[in-house]
Amino acid sequence: MAKYDVAIIGGGLTGLTASIYLANAGLSTIVLEKANQLGGRGITVHKSGASLNLGVHALYRDGAGEEVLREIGVKLKGASPPASAGAVWNNRVYTLPSKPLQLIASRLFSFPEKMELTRLMLKLGKMDTKQIGPISLKEWAEREIRHPMLRHVIYSVSRANSFVPHPELHLAGPAVRQLQRTFGGKAFYLDGGWGALVEDLRERAIRAGTTIMHHKKTVEVEHDGTVRRIRCADGDTIEAPHVVIAAGPKEAYDLVHNADGTSLARWKDSAKPIRAACLDLVLRRFPDGGSTFIAGFWLDQPIFYNSPSTVAKLSDDGSVVIHLIKHLGLNDSHPEKDLLQLEQAMDLVQPGWRKEELARQYLPNLTVVHDFNTVDKSSVYHGPAIPEIRGLYVAGDWTGHGEQLVDASFASAKRAAQAIIADKHSGRGELRVGEGRVIS
């Protein structure tokens, strides 16, 4: 039986990040990954010389994710795209104005809508989102925005930057904060795709002393009110007084013996996983006569278009990477119908693209986030500790304390690691955690 101070179940961004904090603090740490490669949804697939993420990805700067990465020494490589967006309304393509002259010339908005949009952008940048209160994005938009067309714009941008196509459920504060970051130009596309970030984290984890095991499927976390050991599918057991489950709420619940009487059961039942249909394409080049914008927002359909290779290095030969997504949210997947809709969307903005296609991947029912900030869970945070089981922690995109998406993944990884370090070293004096952070 192997023994470690900490065992982490899941080798995605969350698990690797937590392991770096823990190993740097001197704790023997093992990461158990059931797949043959690390990264989870952060993996990058290489096709026809190009790097394809699993659907649309962007890191938003000035958030918890960037702060954590900076603290553990990761230097991001890539670029923020210029303000270059299009809008689709009634199957017509328009420029989504980002500059005064574009707004004046826009055929998408009426003169009163242009005036309100100008005032809205000025007001949005100064808004304190913490003062919005426990209302939905829809309630906020109907209170703050007079013209329905402008609400369509807000909803389409919000579902693109959060994956949530349910403004009636989405908590307004975090949603509006994400809108501020989007309109503020904070989106950042990574060179080499997100797999490059996974590889960076893997190398740092190993240098810090983390043990990483692939093809190591965990089947149960054994406990008697205190974590005792992990049992694996191959019959191995790993003894560890501290366990971090860096997976979704259902998987976490399924792994824990007698989880019915714990907070995991309640968190699993309340979770609202968000799914999407994703069509990822590699084109030889942009077809003649196609749209030149980097981001395309459908105002009357839950579709988003993104061309990250315009600003980030995602191929060796100049080929083009395009991501299209249909936001399913809590709705059912219809793979053939959804694919047809995405292809038709591509026909509209890049006519002739089929002649340039080199490769594709279609993910018809991808879980893009395991839970999100809903109105009924305002100020209700999950983890990192499971109160009923000493030594057990959870982390991931569903365990944000106000953060969302990958910000929640990174922030929760740090919270779980710090809680374990504080517990492990209580009474032993000061212990350094990350750069410039001290836990006594």
Image (tube, rainbow, N blue to C red):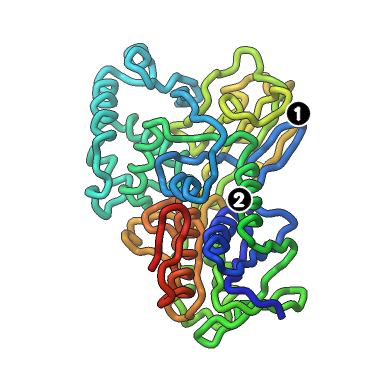
Q: Position of residue 195 (x, y in %)?
A: 65, 44
Q: On the picture, is 290 further left or further right than 106?
A: right
Of badges 1 and 2, the one in the foreground is 2
Q: Residue at (48%, 70%) from the top-left corner?
A: 420
The x and y percentages for residue 399 are 45, 61
Residue 179 horizontal side relative to residue 123, left or right:
right
User: Which quarter of the rendering shows the C terminus?
Assistant: bottom left
Residue placed farthest to the bottom in the image? 224
* Circle 1/circle 2 CB separation < 8 Å: no
Q: Amino acid at mark 1?
A: Leu
Q: Is residue 337 in view?
A: no
Query: Which quadrant of the structure image shows residue 255?
Result: bottom right
Give left or right: position of 395 versus 318. Answer: left
Would residue 78 be found to the left or right of residue 214 on screen? left
Which labelled disc corresponds to residue 92?
none
Can you say whether 262 is above or below 128 in the image? Answer: below
Residue beneath disc 1:
358
Mark pair 1, 2: CA separation: 30 Å
Q: Which residue shows up at 71% across the image and 42% down it?
A: 45
| Closer to the camera in the image, 106 or 211 | 211
Mark 2 nearby-residue class (10 Å; few <14, some 14–19, many ≥20): many
- Residue drawn at x 62%, y 48% is 198
Q: Secondary structure at mark 2?
A: helix
Q: Residue at coordinates 47% horizontally, 65% vertically from top-left?
A: 416
Where is mark 2, residue-wise?
A: 201
Whole-percent x and y of residue 98? 38, 21
Instruction: Name the image quarter holding residue 411.
Output: bottom left
